[in-house]
């Protein structure tokens, strides 16, 4: 069955490999242009004044993403933190700004930052930012409705990846069309993109099609499975400067910040990222194909274009979801002997089950699977540092779904 799937995915795999080559070339060129040297990996302590590693990593990411500036590294604790910083940086530039999400409800963990969940006095809504949300349609972004809303709004937020939703990821062409339409009616509009899971899935990134700020996590695509933690924001200089003030404080910005371990894994991570993302994309397409051959509903389909590394599959039952997650966990290199259990994860509005037998805690560029424990019991599978691991996992998952009679062939 796996062999049959691989044969039918030949052209799809070839396209992923082509993208990886373009991205590897781009990343390598950025290293050369920035003259990255061994001394940039050295640790620092205390204030970290003149920390060359921190400065070089920021400059490298800016170059890779074709942005004016970037803030990258372990001082940003996660993707959520990066996105929250980006949103605060652009939404609090002046009083009473208006924020519009053009891709429907944002990722769960962003809700409390905006103020549509929770009750923090530091939510944007409590700081005088108004919020509106335009739902996605069957075909994607409702560009006309978004443009109309943006006539009177200041910031447009778009989430590129499907996240935990049964929806399509946004293709860059569609995002570009939307940005062009919005900037036509409101040239001062600031476009901010949640780029999580999207990095290196295509040969260009959102800044190149007109986005002003992008943000994401280093324990996903751009960390290449090697960065131990962290996030990044990159984009136009004034917004990055504002993000630096939000990250530390006004007057200090990015002048301070040390890291007592070596910076090597952050540099090596982005260097590896184009290849690792390609491995994950091939793994995702393989999972899609074997699920389709088993009669399950998948999103995206096995031969669809991919703008993120996530493969969603509808299991239809709690037992199916748990079986899949247990199977992914049991063939992981780390913690293979543990059984994932549903839990109330901070930042999420319902119970979530997660399989992550990863070297880095919660890293989802490593092969992992998770899903909210609610109907119709959809599992989201992502990552895979090597395609071979994905292939072995696909075999094991199908075997356990068969044994549990979740599927029959
Ligand atoms: C993972 C993710 C986030 C949050 O990142 P964390 O590192 O988990 O905080 C936000 N948006 C999307 C689309 C994501 O996939």
Image (spheres, rainbow, N blue to C red):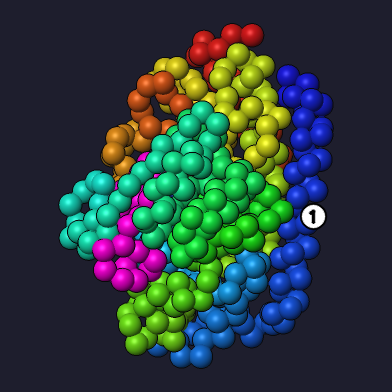
- Residue extending farthest to the bottom is 50
> Can residue 380 be seen in this snapshot?
no
Which percent across, then down, holds residue 12? Answer: 76, 35
Is residue 247 shown above or below 137?
A: below
Q: Is residue 92 magenta?
A: yes
Residue at coordinates 35% horizontally, 25% vertically from top-left? Answer: 374
Which percent across, then down, holds residue 289? Answer: 68, 25
Residue marked by disc 1: 21
Which percent across, then down, holds residue 85? Answer: 38, 65
**Where, quadrant-wise, is the C terminus in this rendering?**
top right
Q: Nearer the viewer, residue 177 or 251?
A: 177
**Where, quadrant-wise, is the N terminus in this rendering?**
top right
- For label 1, the crowd category at 10 Å Cα-Cα, with few meaning under 14, some 14 to 19 and many 20 or more, is some
Residue at coordinates 44% horizontally, 81% vertically from top-left? Answer: 254
Is residue 37 shown above or below 86?
A: below
Which percent across, then down, holds residue 5? Answer: 74, 24
Is residue 154 shown above or below 250?
A: above
In this rendering, position of residue 160 left or right of residue 60:
left
Total numbered badges shown on the rendered structure:
1
Q: In the rendered image, which quarter is residue 104 located in?
A: top left
Please tell me whether mark 1 sits on a helix, a strand or a loop. helix
Residues drawn in magenta: 89-114
- CB at mark 1 closer than 8 A to ligand 1? no
Q: In the rendered image, which quarter is residue 13 located in?
A: top right
Residue at coordinates 75% horizontally, 76% vertically from top-left? Answer: 32
Is residue 245 shown above or below 233?
A: below
In this rendering, position of residue 388 left or right of residue 378:
right
Residue at coordinates 21% horizontally, 48% vertically from top-left? Answer: 118
């Amino acid at each position: 069955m796996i062999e049959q799937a691989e044969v039918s995915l030949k052209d799809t795999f070839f396209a992923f490999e082509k993208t990886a080559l373009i991205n590897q070339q781009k990343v390598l060129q950025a290293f050369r242009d920035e003259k990255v040297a061994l001394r940039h990996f050295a640790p620092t302590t205390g204030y970290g004044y003149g920390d060359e590693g921190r400065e070089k990593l920021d400059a490298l990411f800016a170059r890779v993403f074709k942005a004016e500036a970037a803030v990258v590294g372990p001082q940003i604790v996660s993707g959520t933190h990066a996105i929250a910083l980006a949103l605060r940086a652009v939404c609090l530039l002046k009083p009473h700004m208006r924020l519009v999400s053009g891709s429907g409800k944002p990722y769960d963990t962003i809700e409390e930052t905006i103020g549509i969940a929770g009750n923090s006095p530091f939510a944007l809504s409590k700081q005088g930012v108004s919020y509106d949300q335009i739902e996605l349609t069957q075909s994607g972004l409702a560009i006309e409705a978004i443009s109309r809303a943006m006539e009177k709004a200041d910031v447009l937020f778009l989430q590129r990846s499907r996240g935990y939703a049964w929806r399509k990821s946004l293709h860059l062409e569609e995002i570009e069309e939307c940005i062009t339409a919005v900037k036509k009616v409101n040239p001062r509009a600031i476009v901010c993109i949640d780029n999580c899971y999207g990095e290196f899935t295509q040969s260009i990134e959102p800044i190149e099609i007109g986005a002003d700020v992008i943000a994401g996590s280093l324990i996903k695509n751009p960390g290449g499975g090697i960065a131990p933690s962290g996030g990044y924001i990159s984009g136009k200089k004034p917004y990055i400067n504002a993000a630096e003030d939000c990250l530390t404080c006004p007057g200090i910005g990015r002048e301070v910040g040390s890291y007592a371990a070596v910076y090597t894994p952050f540099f090596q991570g982005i260097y590896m990222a184009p290849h690792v993302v390609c491995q994950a994309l091939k793994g995702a397409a393989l999972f899609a194909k074997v699920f389709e051959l088993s009669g399950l509903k998948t999103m995206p389909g096995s031969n669809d274009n991919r703008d993120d590394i996530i493969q969603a599959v509808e299991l239809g039952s709690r037992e199916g979801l748990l079986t899949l997650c247990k199977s992914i966990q049991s063939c992981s290199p780390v913690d293979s002997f543990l059984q994932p259990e549903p839990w109330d994860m901070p930042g999420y509005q319902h119970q979530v089950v997660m399989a992550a037998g990863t070297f880095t805690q919660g890293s989802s560029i490593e092969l992992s699977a998770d899903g909210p424990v609610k109907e119709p019991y959809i599992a989201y599978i992502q990552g895979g540092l090597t395609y071979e691991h994905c292939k072995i996992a696909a075999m094991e998952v199908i075997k356990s779904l068969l044994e549990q009679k979740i599927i029959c062939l």
